Image: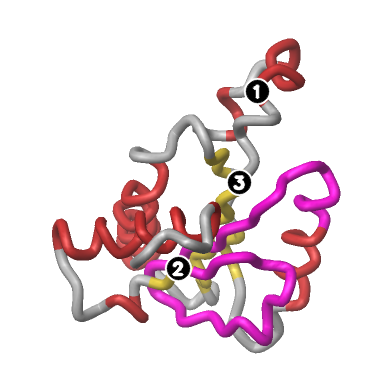
């Protein structure tokens, strides 16, 4: 579910079920031409579908963090920390083109990078993404 789909009147009722916030990280540098930027966004969209579709009633997708040279992720980490302060139990960051490191994002509960999963395709990739998310919610879940 996208953040813009939540109606103000229904948020208090939905909030206990939507306990996980998904933040897309594009990692654009500003050096991309329009076609390259479009392709990056499409890759991210396709990767995010692996989490958004099966977990629609449990995750809410926030606006993407579009630009970042991957040199300083402190702003992204701060945003994740603030999102948790608003009541989300878990924060997941997904990126199609960037490898993000846990030590740079301590406020994030799960980092899913397509680059880290590059050896997987199709159902195998979808299963791995879904298993990692389920493991976040239930650490006893076997991946």
Q: Earlier in the sequence, mark 3 or mark 1?
A: 1
Other residues around mark 2 within 10 Å, as few (<14) / some (14–19) / many (≥20): many
Q: Is residue 109 magenta?
A: yes
Question: Which is nearer the eye, 24 or 116?
Answer: 116
SS state under label 2: strand
Which colour style is shown? secondary structure
Task: Say few, some or many: other residues with alpha carbon within 10 Å of mark 1 (under 14 / 14 to 19 / 20 or more).
Answer: some
Label 3 Cα neighbours within 10 Å, binned few <14 / some 14-19 / many ≥20: many
Q: Which residue is mark 2?
A: 112
- 122 drawn magenta: no
**Residue 20 shows which numbered tag?**
3
Q: Is residue 11 above or below residue 42?
A: above
Q: In this picture, which residue range is highlighted in magenta? A: 82-111
Q: Earlier in the sequence, mark 2 or mark 1?
A: 1
Q: Residue lying farthest front?
A: 140
**Label 3 to label 1: alpha-carbon separation:** 12 Å
Against 11, residue 31 (above or below) is below
Residue drawn at x 61%, y 34% as measured from the top left: 18
**Which is more toward the observer, 16 or 81?**
16
Residue holding disc 1: 14
Could you tell me residue 132's position as x and y percent? 42, 63
The image shows residue 83 at horizontal and vertical percentages of: 76, 51
Please tell me which residue lies in front, 102 or 35. 102
- Residue at 61 percent across and 46 percent down: it is 20
User: Residue shown at 42%/59% (left/top)?
Assistant: 141
Q: Is 49 situated left or right of 103 in this image? A: left
- The one nearer the camera, 50 or 38, is 50
């Amino acid at each position: 579910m996208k953040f813009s789909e939540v109606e103000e009147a229904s948020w208090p009722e939905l909030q206990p079920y939507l306990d996980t916030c998904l933040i897309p990280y594009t990692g654009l540098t500003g050096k991309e031409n329009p076609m390259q930027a479009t392709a990056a966004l499409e890759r991210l969209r396709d990767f995010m579908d692996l989490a958004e579709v099966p977990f629609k009633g449990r995750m809410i997708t926030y606006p993407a963090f579009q630009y970042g040279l991957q040199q300083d992720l402190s702003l992204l980490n701060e945003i994740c920390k603030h999102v948790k302060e608003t009541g989300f139990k878990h924060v997941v960051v997904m990126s199609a083109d960037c490898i993000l490191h846990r030590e740079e994002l301590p406020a994030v509960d799960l980092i899913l990078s397509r680059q880290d999963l590059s050896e997987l395709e199709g159902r195998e990739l979808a299963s791995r993404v879904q298993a990692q998310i389920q493991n976040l919610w239930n650490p006893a879940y076997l991946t």
